[in-house]
């Protein structure tokens, strides 16, 4: 039971990293990217290819650790580099046009991988176990290790994005979302900050991809399809564009709901759960277009204050 | 010897398709001047602002800023050269706090990198402290410090206009363009605004070009006034000269303007 929980926790945490990165692009900087799964794929395949290229036949733990770190870094840098490659031409576009261009990018990545024999083509890529072997008796430590790594990645993402958003660089990004023209006239370099948001978001998607490759040890192009991109977008939109805790909350809720439906529904109607998700997105857009938390963080909500800050004098009504 | 002009626009023309929004626009601003740009709606005043700040590129003619041509520069680069502005239809960063609005405008002078911010280096902390202090000082000057942590769109209209000026000053400009700063203000607020503009002009050593429909405001505040009609300058001179110029009276009030008066002359306020 714990094993399954940790397995799911790992997948969920990696989705959180993806969604947080997309939230920086779509939620905080106000662009509309639909290609986040493309960066995820680049990170996963870069890490995979790098691992296959450098791993010796029977790696020791030290070597395994080195390869792991190297490939993770490679995944991040490759995805970030793709952020530049896609960003420079595409970021001149706005709104719908940017969405379509990035969507096209995601598809191109998948199709190129699918047709590149060196990357395993449609069969996919298989990498060796590096840190721990996932055998019958080591299953639990294996998933525990990756759950810990994935949660660490979430923490690192939240930390980094929070630090950026509370700096003048982050303010410039939010200013672009609020009013692009005013931001530019006040000295904000639009291209620089849009690109920075793109690179940061892509880099974290690359990190998620690298961890995903090492965790599952088998990746296939079809896992990185548009549907993945739409799911990530759904987490961001449902949680609230411009709210990190909202993204985390929505990812957890939707992931759990998805798995519950998968297990509870009889097999013949399981495919309907995607309909349920689409329906949910429509309902959210009608009933609460700003998402669960809007642009607030969890600790800024009224409910949170009522629960945890009752005694705080700052919250007492003014006399 | 005449001082070097801060801004020089020479025969600037801007066409949108068949429409000529600004034609043959000439303007020389000397350092320290306070000049008003007036004219009926649609005369091309805001277009002139957009040309100076680089939102539009001129179709013809050229603009120099401290003798450097601005052609080809993006608005943020022109802002970096010392031009800042406010907007006719207020453009604040609504979802940000009042303080953050001002802090954002320090972006031009932010030296720390993304990495500094992520690692919270000394450079980052020192600079953020400085930005914080300066932003608060500006808010204090505009009597907005009590609302520093309120959302910008929660401010009253007149306060939003003041915040826009505070934010524009945070870029540390030499040339400040104010697009209808008194719009929507009552008589008392307008009076205060005038004092405030005089104050910041000396305090920050500014050159100011402003668009305004409130004639009393322009006549009292500005040393020189330029009148635009249909994209062309039809008159230029001291408030006194503009008030008596028959072309201006005609432009504002139509040709049948006999017997209609522009606002009475006020006792002259010494600038600065």
Image: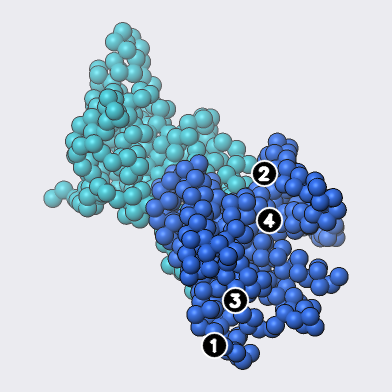
Residue named by callout 3: A127
Q: Are marks 4 and 3 in contact (CB under 8 Å)?
A: no
| Mark earlier in primary sequence (4, 2) | 4
| Mark earlier in primary sequence (3, 1) | 1
Q: Are marks 2 and 3 in contact (CB under 8 Å)?
A: no
Helix, strand or loop at disc 2? loop
Q: Nearer the viewer, residue B104 or A312?
A: B104
Q: Which chain is cyan?
A: B
Chain A, chosen colour in render: blue
Q: Residue at x 60, y 86 (%)?
A: A64
Q: Chain of mark 4?
A: A
Instruction: State left or right for residue A85 relative to residue A283.
Output: left
The single residue placed furthest to the left in the displayed view is B1
In whole angstroms, how far apart are the C-alphas of marks 4 and 1? 40 Å
In whole angstroms, how far apart are the C-alphas of marks 3 and 1? 12 Å
Residue named by callout 2: A290
Helix, strand or loop at disc 3? loop
């Amino acid at each position: 039971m714990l094993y399954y929980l940790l397995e799911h926790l790992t997948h969920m945490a990696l989705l959180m990293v993806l969604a947080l990165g997309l939230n920086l692009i779509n939620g905080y900087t106000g662009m509309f990217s639909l290609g986040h799964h493309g960066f995820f794929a680049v990170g996963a395949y870069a890490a995979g290819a790098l691992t296959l290229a450098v791993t010796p036949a029977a790696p020791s733990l030290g070597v395994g650790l080195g390869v792991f770190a190297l490939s993770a870094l490679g995944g991040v840098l490759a995805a970030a580099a793709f952020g530049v490659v896609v960003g420079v031409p595409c970021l001149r576009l706005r709104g719908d046009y940017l969405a379509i261009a990035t969507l096209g990018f995601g598809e191109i990545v998948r199709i190129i991988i699918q047709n590149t024999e060196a990357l395993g083509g449609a069969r996919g890529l298989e990498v060796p176990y590096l840190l721990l072997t996932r055998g019958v008796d080591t299953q639990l430590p294996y998933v525990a290790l990756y759950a810990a790594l994935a949660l660490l990645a979430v923490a690192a993402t939240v930390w980094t994005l929070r630090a950026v958003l509370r700096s003048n660089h982050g303010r410039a990004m939010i200013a672009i979302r609020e009013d692009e023209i005013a931001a530019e006239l006040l000295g904000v370099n639009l291209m620089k900050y849009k690109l920075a948001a793109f690179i940061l978001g892509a880099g974290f998607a690359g990190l998620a991809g690298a961890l995903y490759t090492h965790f599952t040890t088998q990746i296939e192009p079809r896992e990185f399809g548009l549907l993945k991109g739409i799911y990530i977008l759904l987490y961001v939109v449902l949680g609230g564009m411009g709210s990190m805790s909202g993204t985390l909350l929505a990812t957890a809720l939707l992931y759990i709901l998805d798995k519950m439906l998968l297990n509870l529904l009889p097999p013949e109607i399981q495919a309907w759960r995607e309909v349920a998700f689409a329906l949910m997105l429509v309902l959210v857009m009608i009933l609460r277009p700003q998402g669960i938390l809007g642009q607030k963080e969890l600790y800024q909500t009224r409910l949170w204050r009522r629960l945890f800050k009752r005694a705080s004098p700052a919250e007492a009504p003014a006399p | 010897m005449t001082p070097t002009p801060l801004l020089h626009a020479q025969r600037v023309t801007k066409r949108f398709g068949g429409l000529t929004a600004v034609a043959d626009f000439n303007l020389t601003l000397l350092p320290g001047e306070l000049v008003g740009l007036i004219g009926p709606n649609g005369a091309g005043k805001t277009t002139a602002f957009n040309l100076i700040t680089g939102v539009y590129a001129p179709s013809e003619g050229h603009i120099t800023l401290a003798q450097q041509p601005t052609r080809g520069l993006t608005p943020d680069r022109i802002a970096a050269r010392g031009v800042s502005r406010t907007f006719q239809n207020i453009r604040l960063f609504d979802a940000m706090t009042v303080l953050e609005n001002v802090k954002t405008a320090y972006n031009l002078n932010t030296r720390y990198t993304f990495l500094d911010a992520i690692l919270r280096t000394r450079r980052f902390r020192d600079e953020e402290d400085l930005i914080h202090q300066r932003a608060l000082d500006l808010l204090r000057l505009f009597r907005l410090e009590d609302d520093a942590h309120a959302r910008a769109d929660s401010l009253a209209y007149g306060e939003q206009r003041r915040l826009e000026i505070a934010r524009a000053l945070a870029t540390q400009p030499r040339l400040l363009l104010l697009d209808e700063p008194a719009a929507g203000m009552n008589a008392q607020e307008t009076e205060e605004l005038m004092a405030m503009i005089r104050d910041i002009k000396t305090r920050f050593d500014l050159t100011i070009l402003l668009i305004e429909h409130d004639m009393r405001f322009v006549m009292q505040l500005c040393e020189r006034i330029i009148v635009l009609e249909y994209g062309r300058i039809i008159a230029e001179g001291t408030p006194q000269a503009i008030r008596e110029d028959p072309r201006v009276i005609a432009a504002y009030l139509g040709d049948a303007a006999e017997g209609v008066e522009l606002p009475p002359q006020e006792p002259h306020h010494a600038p600065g």
